Image (spheres, coloured by chain):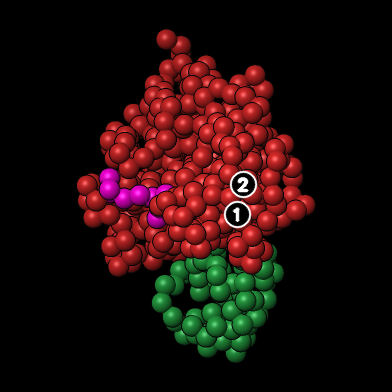
């Protein structure tokens, strides 16, 4: 099912700010992202599902929004 | 002493803040680490607001390229220590508060002692080694930490080690358990930053500090705010506590002191010499030495000394062409040159002396302009 992705910072520079990807859970989402954007595989980013940080794979349902948030270092 | 009723009059008359809020600020001790793009507005607003004791730690000097966003400093301050200049200017802004100025980098040796004296720490640094070091130190001391960082047109803000309504606390490692590869994330020197961005994000940090100290509103505990200045979008996510992640933090003071955060963050590698600008300029003309620019050919500024250009992107295929025994690498900020040095180490081991210019040509320029 299509999942809405919102990307930030350097990740958005690779993927674009907002797009959709087909996935059932966070693991399959990552695989789909890496296949679509090979440069992402090397990148570090936090994942938030519906504005909640997830550190393990969780199931995704239609209309879920997933944010990809890389660390920033500037100050 | 002046009449405080005048200086803080707008706080006193502010509903929900008043004399009580001002008293809380006057009694507070806040440590600001880094007096750069984020640190300048944080320091100015907390000084103006009347925070009773402000510690500021920074080991850098003012350079001309800082002035586009680091608004505490003037053109005449170029070359002077930020900690010294900032302390003088802040004291002029508000002579009634105590300013403790520390002209030094925060390290594993001094961090815990320094932080222990304060109620709140504000991380205004610009690199991951410092950010993980400060995060871990604040976690060990259970000290509230107001974090922010910026990238191009976006900023992140969070408040760590402060219990949310459910009693749980989180820290930076809950977001990013381990540091990224240094090449992966560009800093302001590499990526550029619109000068107003750290101003806005720094003021958000100062706001969180004032709210936390006075119990005003809701602070971003267990939350990460991402703010874009392109469209003013705010995106707030909930950070969930995860005890497993905390096991990555040194378990006690001794373990913390033995941790090498530069190594952990890939910004120092055993066997590769980090040269500062002065040493670099002395060594580039020695015999049997090759100086290699690992930037792409079109990158500016051009170096004002003899060098060969082998971009990092094509280095692995050209390693065997390098004959000199002393190899000195440089790039824009020192990140790619370190990565290149690592590639050369894998090939040559200790058979050649491999060094790189720390801080890159940016640091070299600042050194020669002083």
Query: Looking at the image, which is closer to me, B214 or B271?
Result: B271
- Callout in the foreground (1, 2): 1
Residue farthest right in this picture: B298
Quarter of the figure that contains the C terminus of chain B: top right
Chain designation of label 1: B
Is residue B191 something that shows in the picture?
no
Question: In this rendering, is residue B301 above or below A5?
Answer: above
Q: Secondary structure at mark 2?
A: strand
The image position of residue B356, as x and y in percent, is 54, 46
In reply to whether residue A42 is colored magenta, the answer given is: no
Q: Which residues are magenta?
A: B256-265
Query: Looking at the image, which is closer to me, A35 or B306?
Result: B306
Give the drawing colour for chain B.
Answer: red
In reply to whether residue B264 is colored magenta, the answer given is: yes
Q: CA distance from mark 1 to mark 2?
A: 8 Å
Q: Quarter-wise, where is residue B173 in the image?
A: bottom left
Query: Looking at the image, which is closer to me, A5 or B284?
Result: B284
Query: Looking at the image, which is closer to me, B105 or B206?
Result: B105
Q: Secondary structure at mark 1?
A: loop
The image position of residue B226, as x and y in percent, is 56, 57
Q: Which residue is mark 1?
A: B323
- Which residue is depicted at the point 67% across and 23% down? B75
Quarter of the figure that contains the N terminus of chain B: top left
Give the drawing colour for chain A.
Answer: green
Upstream in sequence: badge 1 or badge 2: 2
Q: Residues within 10 Å of mark 1 (few under 14, many from 20)?
A: few
Is residue B112 something that shows in the picture?
yes
Q: Which residue is mark 2?
A: B290
Residues under numbered marks 1 and 2 in contact, where contact means CB atoms less than 8 Å apart? yes
- Which residue is depicted at the point 33% across and 47% down? B138
The image position of residue B277, as x and y in percent, is 56, 34
- Which residue is depicted at the point 53% across and 58% down? B344
């Amino acid at each position: 099912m299509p999942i809405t992705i919102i990307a930030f910072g350097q990740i958005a520079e690779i993927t674009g700010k907002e797009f959709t990807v087909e996935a059932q859970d966070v693991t399959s989402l990552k695989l789909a992202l890496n296949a679509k954007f090979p440069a992402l595989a090397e990148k570090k980013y936090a994942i938030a599902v519906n504005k909640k940080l997830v550190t393990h794979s969780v199931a995704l349902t239609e209309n879920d929004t997933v944010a990809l948030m890389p660390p920033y270092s500037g100050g | 002493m002046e009449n405080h009723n005048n200086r803080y009059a707008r706080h006193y008359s502010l509903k929900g803040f008043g004399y009580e809020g001002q008293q809380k600020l006057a009694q507070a001790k806040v440590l600001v680490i880094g007096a750069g793009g984020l640190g300048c507005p944080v320091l100015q607003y907390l000084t103006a607001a009347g925070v009773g004791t402000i510690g500021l730690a920074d080991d850098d000097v003012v350079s001309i390229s800082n002035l586009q966003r680091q608004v505490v400093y003037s053109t005449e301050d170029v070359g002077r220590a930020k900690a010294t200049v900032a302390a003088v200017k802040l004291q002029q802004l508000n002579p009634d508060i105590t300013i403790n100025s520390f002209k030094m980098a925060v390290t594993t040796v001094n961090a815990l002692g320094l932080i222990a004296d304060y109620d709140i720490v504000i991380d205004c640094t610009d690199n991951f080694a410092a950010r993980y070091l400060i995060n871990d130190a604040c976690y060990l001391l259970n000290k509230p930490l107001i974090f922010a960082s910026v990238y191009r047109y976006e900023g992140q803000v969070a408040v760590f080690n402060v219990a949310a309504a459910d009693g749980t606390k989180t820290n930076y490692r809950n977001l990013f358990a381990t540091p990224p590869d240094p090449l992966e994330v560009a800093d302001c020197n590499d990526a550029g930053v619109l000068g107003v961005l750290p101003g806005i994000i720094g003021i958000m940090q100062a706001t969180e500090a004032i709210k936390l100290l006075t119990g005003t509103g809701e602070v971003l505990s267990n939350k990460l705010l991402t703010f874009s200045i392109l469209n003013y979008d705010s995106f707030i996510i909930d950070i969930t506590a995860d005890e497993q992640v905390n096991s990555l933090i040194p378990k006690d003071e001794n373990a913390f002191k033995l941790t090498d955060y530069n190594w952990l963050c890939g910004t120092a590698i055993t066997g590769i010499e980090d040269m500062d600008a002065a040493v670099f300029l002395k060594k580039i003309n020695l015999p049997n030495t090759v100086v290699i620019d690992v930037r792409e050919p079109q990158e500016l500024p051009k170096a004002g000394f003899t060098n060969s250009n082998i971009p990092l992107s094509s280095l692995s295929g050209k390693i065997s062409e390098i004959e000199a025994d002393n190899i000195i690498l440089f790039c824009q900020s020192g990140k790619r040159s370190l990565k290149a040095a690592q590639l050369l180490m894998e090939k040559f081991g200790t058979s050649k002396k491999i060094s790189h210019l720390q801080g890159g040509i940016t640091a070299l320029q600042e050194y020669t302009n002083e």
